[in-house]
Image (cartoon, rainbow, N blue to C red):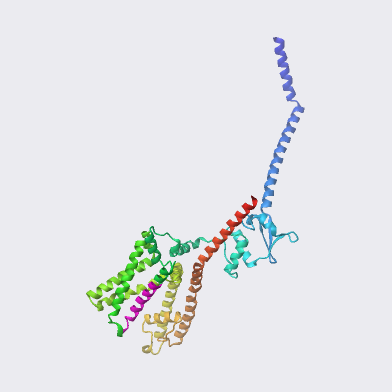
Amino acid sequence: MFVRTGTVKISRTLSNASQNSPEKKLFNQQKKKKESFQCSFLAHHINAIRIGGLVLHQQRVKICVRGTLFETFESTLGNFPNTLLGNISKRNTYFDELRGAYVFDRCVNSFDAVLFYYQSKGTLAKPPLVTREQFYEELNFYEIDGVIDERHMEDLYFLKQNDKKNGELPKGCFRSTVWKFVNFFNDNFIQTAYTYVNLLITLLSITAFCLETEPSLQFAKIWIYIEIGTGIFFGIEFIFFVYSCPNIFQLRRSLNVLIDLASVIVNVVYIILYFLVGNKVAVLIRFFRVIRVFKLTKFSMALRLFIYTLYKCSNFLQIILVTGGTLSFAFAAFIFILENQFNKYKEESAFRSIFDAMWYAVISATGVGYGDIHPTTALGKVCGAFLLVTGILLFCLPQPVLVNQFISVYYLPEIMCNKETLRKNAIMKMRQAMLGEV
């Protein structure tokens, strides 16, 4: 036992001595350096792969459109991989090896908007020098689906609200038929005839209201009979409209419904006062009957668009009115002071108060110029000249804003129609590609 124990102890001592030898230490150090080198090489290899991917991702792409060279990044075009430029396989058919660029014989002005579509990740704006049809033709070629900005969502809701054909129909055959009549669907000859009859009765009511103001025709009995007849017609129409409406809670948000209701109420009150009190007292409410003029908005989409344009530009119009009112008051005060303090003939001055000067300022700034009031002093004429120039510049500002807003809303259904056409074409191409693969 003693010998074996000593042998084990001696062997352990020899093994420890061998591990602590310089050769073993050198071997361990070289092994550790080799392992650390392998780890660092692997890390550098991974970084190189990442950098190479970034370089490939930021690869420049040259596009030549009718001789004009455009450059962009591959990552920019990759924002929309389903389009012609975003899909490398589709784009390679137009690659020219001699030029080292993709060559397209398309509209250069439209391509500026197409490239901005990729750069802005979805913002699509038609260039002013390109027609609407040509621009949508270019979008169809590049396989870009038209995008409507969020600012048009309210416009789309307005158009949808005015397009009753695409809305919800009431339940029941009779209610549905009545709803089509009172909303002028014009699907058949009878509905079209009813629309023209309603328009003629509305014009008859407005014409009778105008002729009734003539002194020689003021007390004729025929006007009250016309008022009763048109009142009965509009009252029955309103009752049928409420009866056939699919969602009666939405009526309170419709301007046409409020106009019809106000017209019927004014008509009933006028007839009651006419028979109870007489024509002299009923004349007080006659001016409220002018509301029926706005019933013409039901027959004219352009008139509704004009009213909606004024509503959309109300903030800008408020600024113009406030600025115009302030400038008119300032010029009126100056002209009043100049015409009364520096005028030798104060008694002959036409500007007796600031209100007279305000009248002159408004009439002159708007370019009407009746000539009933005008300055006579030299300083007053100079102030009036500045007023004319300022008024022309100020009141010309709202015109392009109103025109652009009206045109954008007027052509919005056409934009949506082209968008739907582009979407259907894209779906058909996808189906043809799938059938080709099969």
Q: Main secondary structure of the magenta part?
A: helix
Please tell me which residue lies in front, 251 or 408. 251
Q: In what quadrant of the picture does the N terminus appear? A: top right
Where residue 27 sits: x, y (%)?
75, 30
User: Where is 347 relative to 430, above or below?
Assistant: below
- In the image, which residues are magenta? 196-215
Quadrant of the image occupied by residue 307: bottom left
Q: Is residue 364 left or right of residue 124?
A: left
Magenta run includes residue 209: yes
Name the outermost residue toward the left: 276
Quadrant of the image occupied by residue 339: bottom left
Q: Residue at x 72, y 10 (%)?
A: 3
Q: Is residue 21 left or right of residue 390?
A: right
Residue 325 in sight in this render: yes
Name the outermost residue toward the top: 1
Q: Residue at x 35, y 63 (%)?
A: 242
Please tell me which residue lies in front, 419 or 376. 419
Where residue 115 sits: x, y (%)?
62, 61
